[in-house]
Image (cartoon, grey):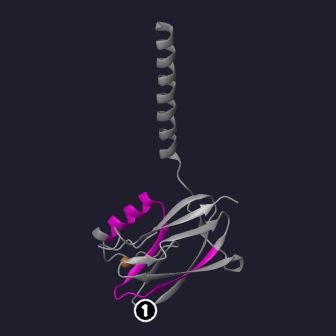
């Protein structure tokens, strides 16, 4: 009986240590968000509409390696932005917008749109995983978010 108990506790210990190991691994496992795409390699166009305050659609699926031409239309009455990134990076950018609202924020993974404006963002998704996008403007960021699932080839 005591031997049985010992085996059980060893199994439990093994399970606990495996779990803690895998969760520690996950936190270091950052998804590559991709890079600005080559316009001559665009495979698809995906249209996104911004309203006050959400993206339509908010969920997008692409394949690994694919280059997408996003056509983003601001159909709302407020200024909006779209930025592609990992959620921790998007959170940092959103807090920078709150703290430094007048700073110029031009970046390759960002588009800024006045009401009624339409712009394009060409992006290549280089690795499989889930990538986020959002409007980082104050008061928009909590609701105005979406997800891009990059499926393995
Ligand atoms: Cu917005």
Comparing 108 with 139, the one in front is 139
Q: How many labels does the image show?
A: 1
Q: Say which residue appears at 47% left-offset and 24% top-offset.
A: 12
Quarter of the image for residue 135 reads bottom left
Q: Which residue is drawn at 66% across and 79% down?
A: 39
Residue 16 is situated, as x and y percent measured from the top left of the image, at 46, 29
> Looking at the image, which residue is at 38% across and 62% down?
91
Picture coordinates of residue 22 (x, y %)? Answer: 52, 38
Residue 149, quarter of the rendered image: bottom right
Task: Look at the image and give the residue range highlighted in magenta.
Answer: 68-97
Out of 16 and 96, give the one closest to the viewer: 16
Task: Determine the residue positioned at 50% across, 8% down.
Answer: 3
In the rendered image, residue 110 lying in the magenta stretch gets the answer no
Find disc 1 in the rendering and name its residue. Answer: 116
Quadrant hosting ligand 1: bottom left
The reply to whether the magenta stretch includes residue 91 is yes
Left or right? Give the position of 79 relative to 106.
left
Q: In which quarter of the image is residue 121?
A: bottom right
- Name the spot of residue 31 as percent of width and height, x first: 55, 55
Q: Please, is residue 123 above or below residue 24 in the view?
A: below
28 horizontally vs 143: left or right: right
Q: Is mark 1 on a helix, strand or loop?
A: loop
Residue projecting furthest to the front: 1
The furthest residue to the bottom: 116
Return the x and y of residue 74 as percentages of the image width and height: 43, 86
Question: Where's the C terminus, which quadrant?
Answer: bottom right
- Residue 143 vs residue 108, the one in the foreground: 143
Q: Is residue 64 above or below residue 8?
A: below
């Amino acid at each position: 009986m005591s031997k049985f108990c010992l085996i059980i506790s060893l199994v439990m210990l093994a399970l606990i240590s495996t779990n803690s190991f895998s969760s520690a691994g996950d936190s270091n496992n950052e998804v590559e968000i991709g890079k600005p795409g080559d316009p001559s390699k665009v495979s698809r166009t995906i249209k996104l509409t911004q309203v006050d305050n959400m993206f339509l659609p908010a969920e997008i699926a692409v394949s690994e390696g694919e280059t997408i031409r996003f056509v983003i239309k601001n159909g709302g009455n407020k200024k909006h932005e779209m930025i592609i990134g990992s959620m921790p990076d998007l959170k940092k950018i959103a807090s920078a917008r709150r703290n430094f609202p007048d700073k110029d924020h031009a970046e390759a993974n960002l588009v800024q749109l006045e009401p009624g404006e339409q712009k394009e963002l060409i992006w290549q998704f280089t690795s499989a995983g889930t990538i986020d996008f959002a409007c980082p403007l104050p008061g928009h960021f909590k609701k105005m978010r979406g997800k891009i699932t990059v499926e393995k080839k």
